[in-house]
Amino acid sequence: MIDKIAKELKKGKIIVCPTDTVYGLLADAGNKKAVAKIFRVKKRKKANFLPIFVSNLTMAKELAVIGKSQEKFLKKVWPGKTTAVLKRRIQGKKSKIYGVDGKTIALRIPKYKLVNSLLEKTKLPLVGTSANISGGPATTEIKKVLRQFQGKKAQPDLIVNVGDLKAAKPSIVVDLTGLKPKILRK
């Protein structure tokens, strides 16, 4: 199953996938068309930037400027349910990411075997945003996920249905761009 999903992600497909928080939408963050489709599927404004899943701290450092104090903090919360907003590295071939701000980037290493396996298999940073229409609630219930996209023009390409997940909320978002960490979402 991991191989099939990884191949679909590499082809630019949008996947509904369980995560360590809620059901999410995954896509290759370096694929402009896939990221544009996520915005259409979610009916999300382009000004609302997307969070990115990374496989490890090395990948995070390719995309963001991470100082010693930030690294110390990240080692305490990653892998896990914390998304860190960091200063973005100047884009090069390895860091060509779409759907994110030009100055900052929101990164997370999830703690969920399926997603971590996909990150390892694809060797790509993946958009990792909640599987819902923007403004609607994120959910751990697969029927609610399916209902949100039912009959919509833009649809995810593949749905990984593992049934309902344990009750959870989206990740905590912490801004690490200033002198002190600042919680943006609890």
Image (cartoon, rainbow, N blue to C red):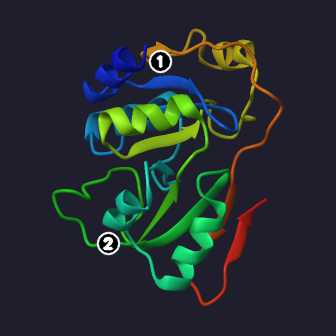
Q: In the image, residue 164 lies at what x, y percent?
A: 75, 18
The quarter of the rendered structure image containing the C terminus is bottom right
Q: What amino acid type is highlighted by mark number 2?
A: Arg
Q: Residue at x 56, y 32 (%)?
A: 113
Q: What amino acid type is highlighted by mark number 1?
A: Gln
The quarter of the rendered structure image containing the N terminus is top left
Q: Residue at x 63, y 30 (%)?
A: 132
Which sits earlier in the primary sequence, circle 2 or circle 1?
Answer: 2
Instruction: Label 2, secondary structure: give it.
Output: loop
* Left or right placement of residue 114 versus residue 134 in this view: left
* Mark seen at residue 138: none
* Left or right placement of residue 29 versus residue 110 in this view: left
Instruction: Label 1, secondary structure: give it.
Output: loop
* Left or right placement of residue 130 versus residue 38 in this view: right
Taking 135 as reference, is 132 above or below it?
Answer: above
Residue holding disc 2: 89
Q: Nearer the viewer, mark 2 or mark 1?
A: 2
**Outermost bottom residue:** 179
> Label 2 crowding class (10 Å Cα cut-off): few <14, some 14-19, many 20+?
some
Q: In the image, residue 124 lies at what x, y percent?
A: 32, 43
Q: Residue at x 29, y 21 (%)?
A: 7
Mark 2 to mark 1 CA distance (whole Å): 32 Å
Q: In the image, residue 94 lies at what x, y percent?
A: 21, 56
Quadrant position of residue 75: bottom right
Q: In the image, residue 9 lies at what x, y percent?
A: 34, 27
* Mark seen at residue 155: 1
**Outermost top residue:** 151
Quadrant position of residue 174: bottom right
Taking 37 as reference, is 150 above or below it?
Answer: above
Relative depth, front residue between 163 and 87: 163
Taking 93 as reference, is 34 above or below it?
Answer: above
Q: Residue at x 58, y 86 (%)?
A: 178
